[in-house]
Image (tube, rainbow, N blue to C red):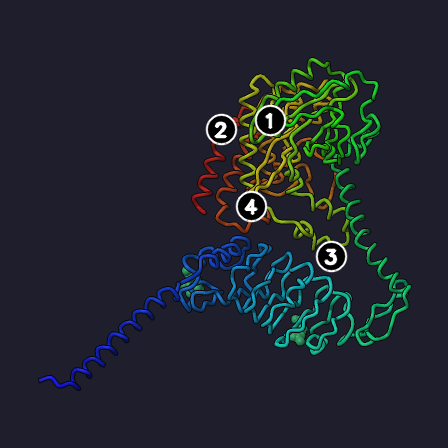
Amino acid sequence: MITNSAVSNIFVVTTYVVLFVISISTMFVHSLYQSKEYFPEERYALMQIRDSVSSTLDLHGNWTGPPCNKNSSQWTGIVCSNGHVIGLVLEGIQLTGSLPPAFLQNLTFLSNLSFRNNSIYGPLPNLSNLVHLESVLFSYNRFTGSIPSDYVELPNLKQLELQQNYLDGEIPPFDQPKLTVFNVSYNQLQGFIPNTDVLQMFSESSYDHNSNLCGIPLEPCPVPPPSPPVNPPQSKKRKLPTWIIVLIAVVATLIPFMIMFVFFYCYKKAQEEETPKERPAGNDDSPGWTDKKMQHSVSTEDPERRVDLQFFDKNIPVFDLDDLLRASANVLGKGNFGTTYKANLESGTVVAVKRVKYMNNLSKKEFLQQMQLLGKMRHENLVQIISFYYSKEEKLIVYEFVPDGSLFELLHVYDKVAKKCLSSDIFYLLVLENRGVGRIPLNWAARLSIIKDIAKGMAFLHQSLPSHKVPHANLKSSNVLIHRDRQSYHSKLTNYGFLPLLPSRKSSEKLAVGWSPEFCKRKKLTHKADVYCFGIILLEVITGKIPGETSPAGNDEKEDDLSDWVRMVVNNDWSTDILDVEILASREGHNEMLKLTDIALQCTDVAPEKRPKMSEVLRTIEEIDRTNHEND
Ligand SMILES: *[C@@H]1O[C@H](CO)[C@@H](O)[C@H](O)[C@H]1NC(C)=O
Ligand SMILES: *[C@@H]1O[C@H](CO)[C@@H](O)[C@H](O)[C@H]1NC(C)=O
């Protein structure tokens, strides 16, 4: 017989069993969600660094699969906990390259970060929001720029090692109580050491060997005679006379302007020297078009002035010459055939206006015919001609405005500026290493996309203008304009179709075809002259070198024949040695880069008939692009 107490016992036991099963299953379900093996955004962050640096370790071979497996990792240098990356330690493996901006943002659980003893250049990485960081070791590298001021906001920072880099600027006021290891020696820091309890705790050897640091624990700050004394930390209470404060304020406001001025001056100078033949011709233009307004450039007596501009595209808001002349304008660039302005019309429309030179003897009919032919063409990789204006003295071509500068600037401008401004050796090294402060390296995907666009535009031109001897005739990197669409780069060709407008061989010399071997040898020009120029651009994009510049040290002698440059760039045993350092690190692209180099060599063959057709080139490049995407 079953007693009452037995029944209640069974009931109690069943209840326990049920509760136990429920709790076990919730734990199980819970743990299913909790112990995710890794987090894709963290993996992506690590891929970014893997692809932007090179090293003696084969990170490409090793960093494959998931970075974390709960608490362990198969990846060299990665430490995981609960599926999150908490340590990134890559020391002494000759990591070379610059770190992608903000790549660490998604490693939110990172607590140890070390790139000690490598060759990383460029600015220090952004660490904002990485609140778990305890140890940050960047010593013995080639970092430049200043110490980001938000490093002082890392709440758990215990160790910060930045010694033996090329950092400049001042030390931000670190005051995290946990900070016990701190070293910024052997840099180019300056100014006084902030008067915080934490920073004053460290010994001299944490600050030694900087250009101009002062204050505790180093020497007190000197008082240079011309500029008023910087307030030393202890004498904070003493009041400065008002005139000194005013003087400080004035000097402090002027300095940035002076720096900007010097920079701008050098930039201008560099640009002018780019086009040395331009300068004498500069003044014989009709007076007027200043950088401010486009007014007065065309004589008011000109009867044709009243004639409205002709428009090719009904979708573009119509404006007349007066609108154009009233527009505020600034110089976009000076080319061999005139100056191009960016004109902001009062209606809000922005256009690019080119004032054409060397076409004075051209009849109105010839100009009109050519412009109408070119103006009708529509292609996403051609800069569209919106309108034009003809008078005897003045010829204008109004183009669509493309916002992001030219390929030439994208590839080299900082080189030029850096060279003109900073001749002292140390700066030369520092700046050229990274092609200048503030330069964003142009990665392989962007370069390939730009190249593909150029090839598309060229193939279209060749197909649309079969009767032209050389349809583009002026293909060079400064005539490839860039527009960026978030992360991706696109390009459009401009200044095409000028060859029929030019009166003489002498003036055609200034076109890019003037560099082709057949032009130099006074042989017949064909479409293949464009193909030659395309080959040169390919080499320029792959190698990052400026065509015609044989020595990087600034030997300004121009070669008449670019073929020598080609031979110099791609010597007999060409290999990955020729690649631009900025793309060298993306190893998975090497194959494609070398395939493109091969195309470039075919395109620059001295014999025009041996060069491929533009349509064939485009096909090959599209093929390469496809395999590149498959590799992603
Ligand atoms: C990466 O290298 C480490 C150390 O050499 C090794 O233990 C690990 O198995 C490698 N991982 C992969 C995915 O090859
Ligand atoms: C700081 O780094 C320098 C150079 O590596 C070293 O000589 C010095 O001892 C370090 N000082 C401290 C306090 O770690």
Residue 354: x %, y % from top left: 72, 28
Q: Amino acid at mark 4?
A: Gln
Amino acid type of disc 3?
Ile
The residue to which callout 4 is attached is 487
Instruction: Give the residue displayed 47% in from the left and 38% down from the top.
Output: 624
Mark positioned earlier in the residue sequence (4 or 3): 3
In the image, ligand 2 is in what quadrant? bottom right
Closer to the chain start, of discs 4 and 2, is 4
Q: Earlier in the sequence, mark 1 or mark 3?
A: 1
Residue at image point 76% right, 44% down: 267
Front residue of 307 and 455: 307
Q: Which residue is mark 2?
A: 616
Of discs 4 and 3, which sits in the foreground?
A: 4
Q: CA distance from mark 4 to mark 3?
A: 33 Å
* Label 2 element class: helix
Residue 14 versus residue 473: which sits nearer the camera?
A: 14
Q: Position of residue 256 (x, y in %)?
A: 79, 54
| Helix, strand or loop at mark 3 | helix
How far apart in space, not on screen, are marks 1 and 3 (Cα)? 54 Å
- Which numbered dot is residue 393? none
The residue indicated by pointer 1 is 315
Q: Residue at x 39, y 63 (%)?
A: 36
Q: Nearer the viewer, mark 1 or mark 3?
A: 1
Q: Quadrant of residue 501?
A: top right
Q: Which residue is mark 3?
A: 426
Look at label 1 and name its amino acid. Asn
Whether the residue under disc 3 has CB within 8 Å of ligand 2: no
Residue 507 visible at all: yes
Q: In which quarter of the view is residue 231 placed? A: bottom right
Judging from the image, what secondary structure is the residue with disc 4 in? loop
Q: Left of 403 or right of it: where is 114?
A: left
Pointer 4 and pointer 2: residues touching (CB < 8 Å)?
no
